[in-house]
Structures are given as structure tokens and as C-alpha cells.
């Protein structure tokens, strides 16, 4: 059946044993809500993960845990296409084509590469990390996605996708949909609890500022309670003057569904400690069913495999079509079998 709903595509790396709140609030939560209004394609991007060294058994385990978490937070394989990137060979194939129309200078301007390679040092930085954004371009264009739900840190990569889609279309004729980023302002960037000027990130120097969905709830509660807050005592939302308190309010608002204004009123006359304690308690209750559902999926590997097989088949059907058209436009001879 041909869907006339706009299409969304997004991915998440299996580079950790758990998603953190930044991944969830910045991206994955939107994936769940877009399932009903959009023709949604979501994947665990294991090809992206190997741009830094991965231990094979850990990568396998993290890939399964990522899929289980996506199901645990509410993705429904009947309402979206959920798959693992390496199960669809066309990602790597289209990435090569995209590599060949990307300028070296253009790729060198990607800030995430600059940050990550600076942290890792030249000797440990791979060519794969350099071309990571181009693989991401291929991921998006393969599915002719209209929108890409991601956090703010991915905006530049979606811009690159737009540029390359337009370049290809201009050179070879209309082939790719030019996508738009789908970034929710309120949760575009969740900050580290210990350093509220830096994004919550699994490669942060200390785990104390990162809240993981699958950590024991009491560990996360402790992190909320010892979050760095700001000078003053009044609970108010001011990202410049009160980045710590504002980050806690954004998180609380996003997981509770209450507006920031409502929360500020609720904490009127109370100190920062009250906000931290209440958020820690709320989070504990909120995360329990997610953990429970994730565990249920992890306990049934055969079911996970079946979901992924079905997802890959649906994804391949679209990806094959795009790649065939792309190869033809470029001038590759069709392969006769
Ligand atoms: N702090 C964040 N706030 C909002 N959104 C975020 N995302 C990541 N961190 C935040 C969004 O999560 C999605 C999946 O990202 P990924 O698989 O690329 O994960 P990542 O970027 O590897 O996660 P980290 O923690 O940021 O890892 P490192 O430290 O390795 O860079 C994306 O849509 C991303 O925007």
C-alpha cells in the first residue's frame, strides 16, 4: 500500500548500554509521536557506531538493547519501520555515491567531526568518522524522507543532506526529496547535570551528569539530587543566568507534560532542593515501565529478530528503488542477472 503521509527517517547509535535523557528527549520521544502522523522509518545505526572502535560482543549486545529500548519507549513495529542499518546494504552503497559529490572542504567544516577528532587525537581518528555525515546523508536520502527528527547537534548534518540532495538533483535530474530537520525547541538540547553549559553526551568526561534510561532508578535519582544549580534560590527559567535550573525544568516539563510556566508557579516560594527532589521522584516512577518493557523485549530475542527481519524487508523495498534510480541517473550499466 502506498502511503501518502509525509515520511520521517532517523537513527540512533548502539554505542552505549543505555540511551540517555538527551537521546530520548531530543529525538526518540518525537519518533514515538510521529508514528501515527507520518510514514516513519527508524533504525539503529551500527555502521555509524564502528566509526570508533567497538568490541564485537558489546556492539551486538548494545544493538539488541537499543532495539529493545526503542520498543520499550513506545515504537510499534506495526506503525513504523524499525530496522538495523547494516541489514540494508544500500546505505553503504549510496554513501559511496554521496562521498563522490561531497567537497573535502565541505566535509571538513562539520563541527561534530572537528570536536570528536580533537578529543580523540589524529592517530585514533578514522576516515569513517570523517565521512560519518555523508553516510547520514545517504541514510536520509535513501528513504526520500521529508523530515528528520533529531536533536540540535544534528542540524548541520541535515543541512549537508539538503545541499547534497540539491546538488545531485541539479546535476542528474530530480532524484531525491530535500528533507527538513524536525527539531523541537524545548528539548533540542538537554544539558549535562554537572556542567549545564555542555550537552548531555555519553562521551562526557564524567558519568555523573548523564541520566541513563536503563540505570537503576536510585542511581539516577542521586544524579538529579546532586545536579549543579546556579546562584540564587528562586526557581525560574532563564537559560543564560540559570542554565542548571532551566535544564532541570526542561527535563521535568518534558517527562511530566506540565508546562515550564506551571512548574515555575508550582515551585514558587520553594528552593532548588525541592525541584531536584521532586524531579528525582517523578523520574523514578516515569522510567519504571520503560525499563520493564525493555526487559520484556530483551528476554525474547526471537521476537526481536522477527521484528528486525520484518523492518529490514520493508526498508529494503524502499532503499532498493532509490538506489536503482540513482545508479541509472549516474550512468552505471544496469546489472543483468
Ligand atoms: N544532549 C542532547 N540533547 C538533545 N538531543 C540529543 N541527542 C544526543 N544528545 C542530545 C540526539 O540523540 C539522537 C541520537 O544520537 P546519536 O545516536 O548520534 O548519539 P550520540 O550523538 O552519539 O549521543 P551522544 O551522547 O551525543 O554521543 P557522543 O558523546 O558520542 O556524541 C540524535 O538525534 C541526537 O541529536
Image (cartoon, helix red, strand yellow):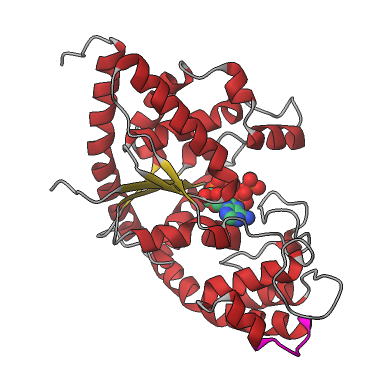
| Left or right relative to 337: residue 160 | right
> Residue sitting at 70 percent across and 82 percent down?
275
Number of numbered markers? 0
Q: Position of residue 317 (x, y in %)?
A: 22, 37
Q: Nearer the viewer, residue 18 or 105?
A: 105
**Of 273 and 297, the residue lying toward us:** 273
- Give the main secondary structure of the magenta stretch: loop
Residue depicted at x 80% and y 71%: 229
Q: Is residue 304 visible?
A: yes
Q: Is residue 202 left or right of residue 47?
A: right
Q: Is residue 199 shown left or right of residue 137? A: right
Indicate whether 165 appears above or below 181: above
Considering only vertical position in the picture, is 66 above or below 323?
Answer: below
**In the foreground, 268 or 80:** 268
Q: Determine whether 307 is above or below 11 in the image.
A: below
Q: Residue furthest right?
A: 231
Residue in view at x 73 percent, y 51 percent: 204
| Magenta stretch: includes residue 269 | yes
Q: Position of residue 328 (x, y in %)?
A: 25, 16
Q: Residue furthest left?
A: 1
Can I make out residue 14 in this image? no
Q: Residue 264, located in which quarter of the rendered image?
A: bottom right
Please state which of residues 138 and 229 is positioned toward the viewer in this rendering. 229
Residue 319 on image: x %, y %: 28, 34
Q: Is residue 223 magenta?
A: no
Question: In terms of image quadrants, where is residue 195?
Answer: bottom right
Which residue occupies the extreme bottom position in the image? 269
Query: Which residue is at a point 20% across and 49% down the rendered structure image?
Result: 4
Magenta stretch in the rendered image: 266-272
Amino acid at each position: 500500500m502506498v502511503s501518502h503521509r509525509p515520511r520521517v527517517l532517523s537513527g540512533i547509535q548502539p554505542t552505549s548500554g543505555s540511551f540517555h535523557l538527551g537521546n530520548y528527549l531530543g529525538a526518540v520521544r518525537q519518533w514515538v509521536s510521529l508514528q501515527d502522523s507520518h510514514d516513519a522509518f527508524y533504525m539503529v545505526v551500527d555502521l555509524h557506531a564502528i566509526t570508533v572502535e567497538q568490541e564485537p560482543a558489546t556492539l551486538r549486545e548494545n544493538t539488541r538493547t537499543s532495539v529493545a529500548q526503542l520498543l520499550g519507549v513506545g515504537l510499534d513495529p506495526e506503525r513504523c519501520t524499525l530496522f538495523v542499518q547494516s541489514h540494508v546494504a544500500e546505505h553503504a552503497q549510496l554513501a559511496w555515491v554521496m562521498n563522490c559529490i561531497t567537497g573535502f572542504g565541505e566535509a571538513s567544516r562539520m563541527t561534530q567531526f572537528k570536536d570528536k577528532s580533537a578529543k580523540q587525537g589524529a592517530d585514533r581518528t578514522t576516515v569513517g568518522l570523517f565521512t560519518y555525515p555523508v553516510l547520514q546523508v545517504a541514510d536520509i536520502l535513501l528513504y526520500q524522507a521529508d523530515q528528520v527528527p533529531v536533536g540540535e547537534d544534528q542540524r548541520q548534518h541535515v543541512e549537508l543532506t539538503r545541499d547534497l540532495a540539491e546538488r545531485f538533483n541539479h546535476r542528474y535530474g530530480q532524484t531525491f526529496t530535500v528533507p527538513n530537520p524536525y527539531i523541537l525547541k524545548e528539548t533540542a538540547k538537554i544539558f549535562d547535570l554537572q556542567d549545564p553549559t555542555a550537552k548531555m553526551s555519553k562521551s562526557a568526561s564524567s558519568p555523573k551528569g548523564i541520566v541513563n534510561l536503563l540505570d537503576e532508578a536510585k542511581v539516577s535519582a542521586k544524579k538529579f539530587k546532586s545536579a549543579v544549580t546556579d546562584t540564587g534560590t528562586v526557581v525560574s527559567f532563564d537559560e543564560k543566568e540559570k542554565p542548571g535550573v532551566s535544564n532541570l525544568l526542561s527535563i521535568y516539563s518534558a517527562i511530566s507534560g506540565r508546562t515550564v510556566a506551571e512548574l515555575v508557579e508550582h515551585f514558587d516560594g520553594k528552593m532548588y532542593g525541592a525541584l531536584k527532589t521532586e524531579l528525582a521522584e517523578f523520574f523514578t516512577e516515569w522510567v519504571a515501565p520503560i525499563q520493564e518493557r525493555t526487559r520484556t523485549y530483551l528476554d525474547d530475542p526471537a521476537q526481536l529478530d522477527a521484528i528486525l527481519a520484518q523492518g529490514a524487508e520493508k526498508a529494503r523495498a524502499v532503499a532498493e528503488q532509490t538506489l536503482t534510480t540513482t545508479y541509472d541517473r549516474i550512468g552505471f550499466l544496469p546489472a543483468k542477472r
